[in-house]
Image: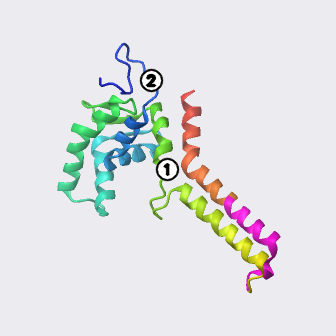
Amino acid sequence: MSEGSAVTPEADTPTEMEPSDIHDILRNDRRRLTIKNLQEQPDGTMGVRELSEAIASLETGEDPPPSDKRQSVYVSLHQTHLPKLEEFGIVSYDSDEKRVRLEDRVREVEVYMEIVPRYGLSWGEFYFGLGLLGTLTTIAVLLGVPGVEALGVTVTATVFFVILMLSSTYHVYAQQDRILFQRFRKE
């Protein structure tokens, strides 16, 4: 194994992944989509054919995706991406059974995968925008800008705090609850 890899050469005991390794893993769309698709499965397991079809469908926007695209994804997963993810202990890949299983090691890369693809914003950008909008609205109320001054500071602050609370509740529910449940199942 190369220096800086996830497994020490002396033993097969995983060490903490280097940020450069994590970025190398997540730099490729198909590896990210592999992790995402496996996370969405109740048992974290998928067949390679099923996984390649899901990824090809996301890449093309077609359901079912064209057979040449499915084949291209299948080959790249089998030859390149799954072995790389397995090398770092993120997945277990049984090439005979053509099954992939997500491993606990995925927790080390999950924090780097925070994306809200539907809107093209990360959660950090969303929260920053919400905070900025709340601050500017509060300043507008304090300065007596017509139309917003009638709201009052208390109402404005309450509305933005409620929106922040609801957003963070959704974020935890959508992104983290399955991780918590996975932790309970494995213990």
Which quadrant of the structure image shows residue 168? Answer: bottom right
Q: Residue 102 placed where, x, y %? A: 42, 36
Q: Assign the N terminus to one quadrant of the image.
A: top left
Query: Count the marks: how many?
Result: 2
The magenta stretch spans residue 158: yes
Q: Residue 4 placed where, x, y %? A: 37, 27
Q: Residues within 10 Å of mark 2 (few under 14, many from 20)?
A: few
Type of the residue with mark 1: Glu
What is the spatial separation of the Cα atoms under label 1 and label 2, in whole angstroms? Answer: 23 Å
The magenta stretch spans residue 172: no
Q: Residue 34 placed where, x, y %? A: 36, 45
Q: Residue 142 placed where, x, y %? A: 78, 75
User: Who is closer to the viewer here, 173 or 29?
Assistant: 29
The answer to whether 164 is drawn above or below residue 108 in the figure is below
Q: Earlier in the sequence, mark 1 or mark 2?
A: 2
User: Who is closer to the viewer here, 20 or 175?
Assistant: 20
Is residue 78 found left or right of 158 in the rendered image?
Answer: left
Q: Which mark is residue 166?
A: none
Is residue 28 found left or right of 158 in the rendered image?
Answer: left
Q: Which mark is residue 15?
A: 2
Q: How is the image coloured?
A: rainbow
Q: Assign the C terminus to one quadrant of the image.
A: top right
Q: Which residue is mark 1?
A: 114
Type of the residue with mark 2: Thr
What residue is rendered at 45% in x and 43% in y?
Answer: 39
Magenta stretch: helix, strand or loop mostly: helix
Residue located farthest toward the top when viewing the structure as drawn: 10
User: Who is closer to the viewer here, 63 or 106?
Assistant: 106
The answer to whether 165 is drawn above or below residue 146 in the figure is above
Tell me which segment is drawn in magenta: 147-164
What residue is rendered at 54% in x and 29% in y?
Answer: 186
